Every structure is written in C-alpha cells, then in structure tokens.
Amino acid sequence: MIRKKIWVALMLMLGGNIPAFADVIVLGIEGRPAPATEHAIVATEPCALRVLLPPNVTTAGLRADLFQIAGQVARPLPGEINIIPSPDDSRIAIVKLTPPAVERVTRITLRLGDLGTINIIVYPAPKTRSDRPVLADVLATSRLKLAVCGRSAELRAFLKTHAIEFDDLGADAPDTLAPDMLLVGVLSAGDWSRLAASPAKGGLLAFVDDASLLPGVYAHARPAALATKVTLPLLPALSTDPRAQETLFTLLLTALTPPRP
C-alpha cells in the first residue's frame, strides 16, 4: 500500500505521464572489486550474446574465436560466429554462436579480437546427459514424499520436466513437516523460522527472501533432518539459465541423499 501511494505521488509530480525508463547497467560499487562474470549456455543450442563495445569501436571487421580452457591450455574450437550491430543501440554488438556438444560442464572462452575475452560455461544438452543420476530414481530410492508449496510456477515446471511426482500444497506453507516428507518451496521468513525449528523429522528445502544475507545456500542444524535455506534468486531463472537448473538439481540431490551417520 505504501509503495502504491509513493508511485501515485510520483505520477502526480510527473504530470501523469509514465516515464520511459532505459535499461540501467550497474558497473559496481566504488572501492569494491567487481565479481567475475561467467555466462551459462547449453551445448548445441544457438544463442546470442549482447556485448557493449568500447567507444569508437564498431562491429565492422570485428573477429571472434572460441577456445576450450583446460588448465593453462586453450584449444581452438570450430564453429561459425556472426557479429552484427544491435538494431536498438549502435554501441551493442550481437554475437551469435552455437556452442559445441560436450559430455560434461565445460568452460570455454570467446575472444573478441583485441578487445578481450568473455568467459562462458557450456552445459550438456539435457536429453543427452549421462554425467549425473536421474532425480526420479533418487527420489524413489529415498522413500521420501516430495511436497511443494509457495508461488513458483518455475519450480513446479522443473519437477515435471524431471518426471518427479510431488504433492502440491498450494501457496501456503504447511503447519508441520511430515516424517517422510521433503518440503520444497518458497517460504516467508516467518514460515522458515517456524518449520526449521520444528522437531518433526521431515526435510526442508526453502527459498527465502532474506536481504540481510549474501545470495547463497545456508544449512540449518536440526537434530531430526536436513533444513536448507536458499537466498539465491534461483527460481525465476529456471526456465532460461542452465546454471540455475544445475543448482536446483544439486540441491534436490543433496536433500534426497543426506549423509549417513
């Protein structure tokens, strides 16, 4: 309600016209090192990278090459790469490429002439993966029942893609954790605190919005079962980012195969 009032006040100040905001790119915070960025793509699937060019540089004559990185060795990779100017902004180049097939997660580098390099992580195509177990089989072996709560269509779509059966509890968190349940879902801070402190033996994998913590994965010590708090902006990226998909896969695999005493 407060945000709505602020927005209405802003609209009145602007004469009722909705401003056309441009995309803002934050380069970092002064005095802090910029985090290294690696872009995740899927093998054999065409993709297009949007690259901001330095001043007075155009796409004319710009060359791009791919290399596979293994330790200190860079091996050239075949493949056609097309570079075209963006129709929306002359400062931006569209770099179109199709990454090669890989059997495991692989780091490659895209070199743009003398401008520098772009680090890329290539994930195997989902239908050809043989480097990890099948989640549905792991769930069956665990003898746990999977339950989902919270407002995330992406989470439910991911589970269906992996043929994982689950009980859909809707938007609200349950009152308690069943002993044979692994609850996965989006929780409020209050629901997380309540369920993580529960003496029930059910497992918990919760996605919680917590601005006080760095984006990450936090294990909660419980005597009964594993409870994991995830503050990463993971779920909205599931449909497009293979690294988000791989992260959720690993979280589920860990939750379904807890270490034995």
Image: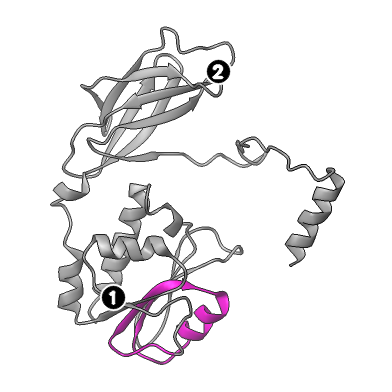
Snapshot quadrant of residue 44: top left
Residue 88 shows in this picture: yes
Q: Is residue 73 left or right of residue 232?
A: left
Element marked by disc 2: loop
**Residue 149: x %, y % from top left:** 42, 75
Snapshot quadrant of residue 6: bottom right
Q: Which residues are magenta?
A: 176-204
Residue 205 shows in this picture: no
**Residue 217: x %, y % from top left:** 43, 64
Magenta stretch encompasses residue 182: yes
Magenta stretch encompasses residue 67: no
Instruction: Reply above or below: 27 against 159.
Output: above
At x 37%, y 47%, the residue is: 241
The residue lying toward the viewer, choosing from 216 and 204, is 204
Mark toward the start of the polypeptide (1 vs 2): 2
Residue under pointer 1: 166
Residue under pointer 2: 90
The color scheme shown is: one colour
Residue lying at the far front of the rendered structure:
16
Q: Is residue 90 left or right of residue 77?
A: right
- Mark 1 → mark 2, Cα distance in angstroms: 48 Å
At x 54%, y 24%, the residue is: 88
Element marked by disc 1: loop
**Residue 257: x %, y % from top left:** 23, 73
CB within 8 Å, label 1 to label 2: no
Residue lying at the far bottom of the rendered structure:
199
The residue lying toward the viewer, choosing from 248 and 220, is 248
At x 74%, y 61%, the residue is: 4
**Residue 20: x %, y % from top left:** 69, 37
What's under tag 1, amino acid-wise?
Phe
At x 62%, y 38%, the residue is: 26
